[in-house]
Image (cartoon, grey):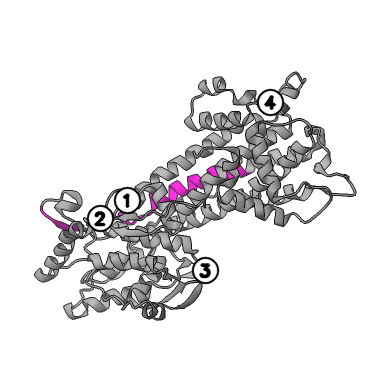
Amino acid sequence: MPSVTSQPVPIGGRALTFDDARALAAGAPAHLDSGAAARMAPSRALIDSALHRGAAVYGVNTGFGALKSVRIADADLAVLQVNLLRSHAAGAGPELEPAVVRLMLALRAHSLSLGASGVRPELVARLLELRERDILPVVPSKGSLGASGDLIPLAHLALVVIGEGEARHAGRVAPAAEHLRDAGLAPLILAAKEGLALINGTQAATAVGMLALAEGFEVLRAAHAACALSVEAMRGSPKPFDPRVHALRPHAGQIASAAAVLRLLQGSGIVASHADCDRVQDPYSFRCAPQVAGASLEAAWFARERLVTEVNSVTDNPLCLTAGAAGASPPEIVSAGNFHGQPVAQALDFLAIGMAEVGSIAERRTYLLLESAKSGRPPVLATNPGLESGLMIVQYLQAALVAENKALAHPASVDSIPSSAGQEDHVSLAMHAAMKALALVRNVRRVVAAELLCAAQGVESLRPARSSAALESLHAGIRALVPPLTGDRRLDQDLDRLDSWIASAAAADAAGVAPF
């Protein structure tokens, strides 16, 4: 992700924005809003009142899931919360990367501090302190069903709060108790409901999804730059990007996409050099680029709206409905289903489908650049075709990644599998959608890096003709990282550098592509 501001982000106050989430993932500091404690007090009082009356409250003095009818003695309420975290820490797979865990801590703190979860301010403060001290829980990536919350990953996150599980600090994984001791922090003793509140939420899928979305927007920006550079290398027409065309089919994404590419082509000497050529129409991957990329842009915009809403939601169960939380009168503890991740899952499935098409059409343009009969450029853009394979295999890599993306784009949100003796009989698989979307976005980033590599080589074969100022700046940026291909060499390292360049936002910035 690009670097972001390090201004502290307020937790539990104003609504968080997409940029806030990006900043939190990148390590920006966070602080508990001054009004959060007062906002949280009524819901905690509601829990304490219910316990004082002896009322049965799910997860507070009952068992969980299929064990909901088992009443727990008052003397065992603290043990119940600890047992919940221990029993639910059953994850598998590679650990979530630090950016995701940082964001999970912040988002869980934010949701709990909105005043409908019945927890104490000190619990929220501890989550934020772990971030501040860079004590990041080790959270396995597999195990969430995306309903009843991201139970397994959040349980691993929550164990560190009570001094159990493992954590990563300064790159070193050790028992959480050791890292807490070194930081001068004592394990937190949970009050009634707080263990359940820590794990009943969508913050694992939301955090992974936010990372996928943030990286996806940088890929989209770079993809428009790569498209424009390919148009130049192909000596394609700028006419399909004419705003009059898109005014006749006014999808907002299509209009924005066409405008972004047309701006990059304006003032191009290469365009001027073939203004009177006899080519009537370019292939679809050039001529229909705004229609395809525009649809993908709208998928990303939709996902952004959904995820920002989720970031600012209370996804706990049961909910403590007080006057401060939801205008409830009288105050009431209500079991409901805000933990169900379907809104997140569907949005991220849509994002994945849209991003898959960005990669698919980029691969087609690259294929045409390497096909001399179509492009008029040297075969496979090699200096000595035949003796040299040039950039031939770069397109093979693209094709392999595009093929993989077809599987990754298969929606997770249409699936479900019952759990907990049928009590949890429909789940969202939001975490599956999030992990697939993140992997797919990173595949597409490599596909776009390959298009940039080939388009830059193609433009050089047209010298001394010059492109527009924006595309010459983009070309110079590519050449600062990757030298021209003058003979066969390994290409993975070239692609690594361009991939990182896209991820840092520098590729789009070099061409002046504005954020979408």
Give the residue displayed 65% in from the left and 35% down from the top.
471
Task: Check if mark 1's residue and mark 3's residue have beta carbons within 8 Å.
Answer: no
> Mark 3 or 2 closer to N-term?
3
> Mark 4 or 3 closer to N-term?
3
User: Which residue is denoted by mark 3 in the rendering?
Assistant: 93
Question: Marks 2 and 1, how far apart in space?
Answer: 8 Å
Location of residue 385 by image quarter = top right
Task: Check if mark 3's residue and mark 2's residue have beta carbons within 8 Å.
Answer: no
> Mark 2 or 4 closer to N-term?
2
Of residues 479 and 322, which is closer to you in this image?
A: 479
Task: Check if mark 2's residue and mark 1's residue have beta carbons within 8 Å.
Answer: yes
> Mark 4 or 1 closer to N-term?
4
Give the residue displayed 58% in from the left and 47% down from the top.
506
User: Which residue is denoted by mark 1 in the rendering?
Assistant: 312
Residue range (magenta): 330-359
Tag 3, which secondary structure? strand
Which label is found at residue 237?
4
Question: Marks 2 and 4, how far apart in space?
Answer: 53 Å
Identity of the residue furthest to the right in this view = 387
Q: Is residue 380 magenta?
A: no
